Amino acid sequence: MSAATRAYVEHVAIWVSDIHWHIRFFQEVCGMTMREVQGTAEEPVQYWTLGGMQFMAKPDFAGPEGRLGHIGVMCEDLEAALAAAQAFAVAEMPQGRNWLRLPDGLAVEFIQASTGAVAQALAIDPRA
């Protein structure tokens, strides 16, 4: 069976009760610096790091750990991925046709990659 497209996980989004703690932890422990922020650096609502983390502020979240919001997947061919996904009983989400809710509830955001980006990302050996 061949894949409809090649892809890689671009970010993992989690809800966190203390966004500043998570920003500091991943920056100081892993060197993951800011790629993008929604809100301001002082009062972020969402915060993306280089390295694929997305923190979404949810101050009332009482879980012992971050709760997965969604997985962002960069695709060589977004349309092919969306077409192939329909065979798997997925549901389109209100955010748009590229947001799919899987039968177990997991949310996946498919994103169209620029030419060559997926091949370049997949060429990286993270254990090398």
Image (cartoon, rainbow, N blue to C red):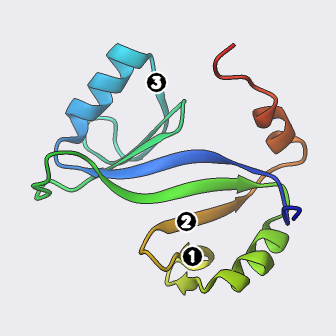
Three-letter residue code for mark 1: Leu
Three-letter residue code for mark 3: Thr
Picture residue at 36% right of the left edge, 25% below the top: 26
Is 57 left, or right, of 80 in this rendering?
A: left
Task: Please tell me which of labels 2 and 1 falls first in the chain.
Answer: 1
State the image coordinates of residue 85 (x, y, percent, origin top left).
71, 77
Task: State yes or no: discs 2 and 1 in contact (Cβ < 8 Å).
Answer: yes
> Which mark is drawn over residue 100?
1
Which image quarter holds the C terminus? top right
Disc 1 element: strand
Picture residue at 24% right of the left edge, 41% below the top: 19
The answer to whether residue 18 is above or below residue 6 is above
Disc 2 element: strand
CA gap between label 3 and label 1 equals 28 Å
Task: Please tell me which of labels 2 and 3 falls first in the chain.
Answer: 3
Residue 73, quarter of picture: bottom right
Q: Which residue is mark 2?
A: 108
Marks 3 and 1: which is nearer the front? 1
Disc 3 element: loop
Q: Which residue is mark 3?
A: 33
Residue 27, quarter of picture: top left
